[in-house]
Image (cartoon, grey):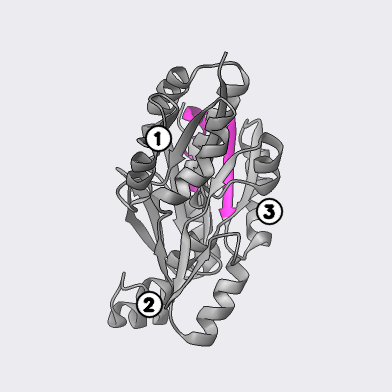
Amino acid sequence: MSRIKIFADSTSDLPKTWVQQHEVGIVPLYAVFGDESLKDGVEISPEQLYARVDREGRLPKTAAPSPADFMASFGPYIDQGYQVLFISLSSELSSTYQNALIASGEFPDGSVTVFDSLNLSSGIGVMVMKAVQAAEQGKTITEIVDILTEMRPKVEIEFVIDTLDYLYMGGRCSGMQNLIGSLLKIRPVIKVTDGKMTPAYKVRGKREKAIDQMMNNALSNVDVMDNDTIIVVHSMCEEDALAIQKTLHEKTKAKHIEMATAGCVISSHCGPKTIGLVFVRA
């Protein structure tokens, strides 16, 4: 039986202890400040990114791993006789998927399989977890891809964004929208639909109100929720994430309620105190 090595990119926002325990390979994207390209989670942390944005008053650009990056990551495992399955950030959001496909063509047929998650952050992470479980149960690559294909449209993810400043600096809202939104304390909530980030709704008022709305949306689906894994993902708001995790333990039947920290790429788009909730419909 061929051994399987599962890879994801750094936007998958998997719990670090889980990555280590299950030996998931992570291929980092880049945060780019001018001529300086820094590997997400390797050469720069979210804390360092936020400090630099505050100091310089500008956001980094983000860049996908190159085909050469993927070849360098996959190659040693192919040489050892592994089959590689790479679960990618949505092809609608990045060239990560396409670059991985290019790299896969440099290896023998069947050595590398690239799967488009059509998701981001821990929406990818929950799929990676499912793939790892399947591999550990002895499933083949084809069987795992079938599982992921069926699962993909059932992944639900919402993010509450605390400030419009990062959306403004990233060109995703105008200066006037930012000003009005800040004055009215409007908290945008983002969903992933068909592989793209889309505004779900806006909540006016305190941040807690928006978080409560996100939680209520998830709990309204408790009867159709897959009871395996829920992920709470956050950027610099661990206390809020722990509170949500506690509530989910009380009000759902999920076996695993994991907490994850958003990496630099996700943080650079959404900003500090962003918090998200991921579950899968049964």
Q: Quadrant of residue 255?
A: top right
Binning the other alpha carbons within 10 Å of mark 1 as few (below 14), some (14 to 19) or many (20 upward) gives: many
Q: Specify the label residue 114 is tagged with.
A: 1
Q: Is residue 113 above or below residue 74?
A: above
Q: Which residue is mark 3?
A: 242
Residue 219 counted in the magenta span: yes
Left or right of 24? Residue 150 is: left
Q: Which span of residues is magenta-colored?
A: 216-233
Q: Specify the label residue 183 is tagged with.
A: none
Query: How far apart are labels 2 and 1 at the CA level?
Result: 32 Å
- Mark 2 or mark 1, earlier in chain: 1
Binning the other alpha carbons within 10 Å of mark 2 as few (below 14), some (14 to 19) or many (20 upward) gives: some
Tell me, yes or no, if residue 257 can be seen here: yes
Query: How far apart are labels 3 and 2 at the CA level?
Result: 29 Å
Q: Which residue is mark 2?
A: 169
Q: Secondary structure at mark 1?
A: strand
- Mark 3 or mark 1, earlier in chain: 1
Q: Is residue 204 above or below residue 87?
A: below
